[in-house]
Image (tube, coloured by chain):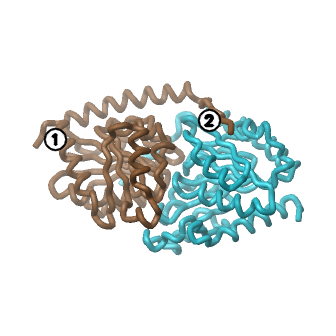
Chain colours: A cyan, B brown
Amino acid sequence: MGNIVKEPRIVKIRENVLRKNDILARELRERFKKEEVYVINMVSSPGSGKTTLLTEVLTRLGKNYNVAALVGDLATENDADRLEKSGARVKQIITGTVCHLEAQMIEESLENWELSNIDFLFIENVGNLVCPSSYDLGENERVVLFSTPEGEDKPEKYPTMINSADTTILTKVDLSEAVDFDKDLYYKAVQDARPGIKMFETSVKTGEGVDEWVAHLIAGRSETYKTN
Amino acid sequence: MGNIVKEPRIVKIRENVLRKNDILARELRERFKKEEVYVINMVSSPGSGKTTLLTEVLTRLGKNYNVAALVGDLATENDADRLEKSGARVKQIITGTVCHLEAQMIEESLENWELSNIDFLFIENVGNLVCPSSYDLGENERVVLFSTPEGEDKPEKYPTMINSADTTILTKVDLSEAVDFDKDLYYKAVQDARPGIKMFETSVKTGEGVDEWVAHLIAGRSETYKTN
């Protein structure tokens, strides 16, 4: 069996784009820090359940905190419509043909928002396990979601994504049995790809694990900004 | 709710890359035609079940035809290892950080293969619902797979992918009930995105629909090359 290792042909230009993005992301991070906004960048493949989990988290977290969300998609405002049911402030970013969100899109989306009124800002990235990995959005925490129906080996197959992440969530654990999901194999794949990364498990259907992730976010914010 | 429509910043370079790819794809198509190889480009999001379905199809089709497969991934040879269980000739293409296969990768992979000995060549693309859409690989048929756990709205959310496809397969239909999948909604989303596109449904677990897709491929090849 032969391997063909390809070098991207557009490396140089991409490097310039990324440099620009990094500068903007740094500026965003400064603003978030100043206003004590804890920012979570959610990445995953399409259909892993980002919107469903986020709707639930916005609802639970929204009882005690000011929460907001930006959501990226190539087309449609479906996800923003779904997220708005939580009562949170939500804005859709339509990327057209671009398979990731960039710091500039975040900056433009925040133009009319008062950051001092936001405790937690969630950024639901475009459903894609490759493109979003190189784009820093100024977030405090990048979480990558894998769902049980996708199979156990995704962490191993998408190394750039898991290497750029801070946390993982295994979603749809209620389906584990129906899809013959082997959790041990998955945990091994995650830890092989990124030793020591924090791992959560959720099912919005049964409610399992959602409070644990919410508690983790509250702790993250209070550690970062020394709030109570 | 505001929209932010972004223009990709690397359009110009990408156009040149695409032009190069199209020329190579045309050459590949000529070669496939000369040797009567029917080529299927399989695209989908990660974990939709491309490899599982393909293993089954290679096994069934391999009883009467010479079948082969190329499989693209950022990392690992897992999928080639799985596909080889079918007994078919298989080659893994490792793309590194590239989120799609290109015509050049296909050409290089075929270097030591005798095309005249192949009736059906399957190309399992990198799991991604965005990047592969712009890259013609010289295929006869591009099929996009959506799995029931991904939800009904994916055809609507990934318009560039479904617009470049010839056929759709809904996979993991055995899970429909467990994931509350609404088939009518899905069919509507598919037909709204691409009116008239041919739609299949499969479950490798129950065997449902696999023979129908195999029969469609056999018919496709015999119509294209006037073989029997």
**Helix, strand or loop for disc 2:** helix
- Mark 1 vs mark 2, foreground winner is 1
Would residue B78 appear left or right of B60 to someone viewing this image? right
The x, y position of residue A76, in whole percent, is 56, 41
The x, y position of residue B209, in whole percent, is 27, 57
Q: Given the image, what chain letter belongs to the residue carrying mark 1?
A: B
Disc 2 crowd, CA 10 A, few/some/many (<14, 14-19, 20+): some
Closer to the camera in the image, B56 or A158: B56
Q: Quadrant of the C terminus of chain B?
A: top left
* Badge 1 amino acid: Ser
Compared to residue B45, the image places residue B140 above or below, namely above
Q: Residue placed farthest to the left in the image?
A: B228
State the residue position of label 2: A14
Tell me the residue at 54%/66% (across/down): A172
The x, y position of residue A194, in whole percent, is 62, 63
Distance from label 1 to label 2 (Cα)?
Answer: 44 Å
Image quadrant of residue A159?
A: bottom right
**Helix, strand or loop for disc 1:** helix
Residues at marks 1 and 2, common chain? no
Compared to residue B51, the image places residue A191 above or below, namely below
Would residue B120 appear left or right of A123 to someone viewing this image? left
Q: Which mark is residue B222?
A: 1
Count every numbered label the image shows and give the total.
2
Closer to the camera in the image, A151 or B209: B209
Residue B118 can be seen, yes or no: no
Compared to residue A187, the image places residue B74 above or below, namely above
Compared to residue B212, the image places residue B101 above or below, namely above
Q: Which mark is residue B183?
A: none
Tell me the residue at 63%/63% (across/down): A168
Q: Given the image, what chain letter belongs to the residue carrying mark 2?
A: A
